[in-house]
Amino acid sequence: MKRRDLYFGLFVVLTSAVFSAPLRALLKLSIDNDAYSQVSFVPLVSAFLVYLERRKIFAQAEYCLRAGSIPVAVGMGGFCAGRASLLPPETTDHLAFMMLSLLLVWIGGFVCCYGLRAFRAAAFPALFLLLMIPIPDFLLNRIVYALQKGSAVVTYALFRMVGVPVLKQGFVFSLPGVNIQVARECSGIRSSLALLIASLLAGHFFLRSRWRKVSFSLIVIPITVIKNAIRIATISLLSVYVDRGFLTGRLHHDGGIPFSMIAVAILVPLLWLLQKSERGSWSRQEADG
C-alpha cells in the first residue's frame, strides 16, 4: 500500500505542477472573492475524509490502469483545450473548466493506483471535490439574484408580520425615515455555501439513506433565505427605531456568524428528526425480515 500511496502522491504533485497556473488563479480567487472562499479548503476536507475512511476505501485496493487512463486522458484533453481556448484565463468560466479537467485527472490517477472498488468506496470524498470548482459567472449571477429575490420576499413578509409600515419596490424597502436595499452583497451567497458544505458533511456522517441526505442538503436553501431575511429585517428595524448607525455598524458588516446560528438552530433538530425516522425505518425492516 505504501508503494501505491507513493505513486499516487507523485501523480498528484506532477499534475498539480502542470495545472499550476489555474491552481494559483483559484487560490487568488478564493482570497479576493467571498463567494469562492470555500474552494481553498475543500481539498483538505476531502483528504481528511479519505483518511477517516481509509480502512473501508483501501480494503481491496488494486491497480486498474485501463479504467483510470480514460478520465486522465479526458482531463488532459480538457487542459489542452483550455490552454487553446479563446476565453480569457482569468475568467471564472475558464477556471471552472480547468478545475473540472484537473479533478478528472486526479480521479483517473486514483483509479489507476487503487481501483474501481476503492473509488466507489471513496465516492463522497471524490464528489465533494466538485465544490472546489468555482461557480461560473453566468450561473453565480442567477443564484445570487434568486437569493436576493427570496430574501426580499421573506423580509417584506416579516415587516408586515410585525406591523411595520413598509413600501416594497423591487429590492428596495421604504421604511419610516429610511430606504433599505437588498443589494447583491446581501444575498447571503457565502453563508449559503458554508451551510451547504456543513449539511453535506453532517448528512454523510449522521444519515444513511441517500434521499434523507439529499433532502437535508436541499433544505439549506429555504433556511438560508429565511436566515438572511431575519438579518436584513433585524438590522433595518434597529436602524429605524434605535440608531441609524446599525446600517453601517459591525452587526451589518460582521454579523454573519450570529445570524448563521439561527440556521444551525433549525438544521440541528431537522437532522435529529431525520435520524429518528431513519432508525425507525431500519427497525421496521429488521422486524419484517
Image: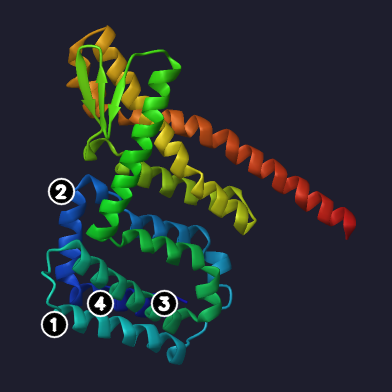
Name the foreground residue: 226 vs 249: 226
Q: CA distance from mark 1 to mark 4?
A: 18 Å
Q: Nearer the viewer, mark 4 or mark 2?
A: 2
Amino acid type at mark 3 = Phe
Q: CA distance from mark 4 to mark 2?
A: 25 Å
Residue 40 in sight:
no
Q: Position of residue 55 (x, y in %)?
A: 56, 66
> In the rendering, which numbered label is found on residue 110?
3
Q: Earlier in the sequence, mark 2 or mark 3?
A: 2
Residue at the outermost right position: 288
Q: CA distance from mark 3 to mark 1?
A: 27 Å
Quarter-of-image position of residue 174: top left
What is the quadrant of the C terminus in the image? Answer: bottom right
Residue bearing the label numbered 4: 15
Residue at the outermost bottom position: 66
Cβ–Cβ under 8 Å for marks 1 and 4:
no
Residue bearing the label numbered 2: 32
Name the foreground residue: 117 vs 224: 224
Task: Using the image, determine if residue 237 lies above or below residue 47.
Answer: above
Residue at point 22%, 36% (across, down): 183
Residue at point 50%, 68% (across, down): 123
> In the rendering, which numbered label is found on residue 84?
1
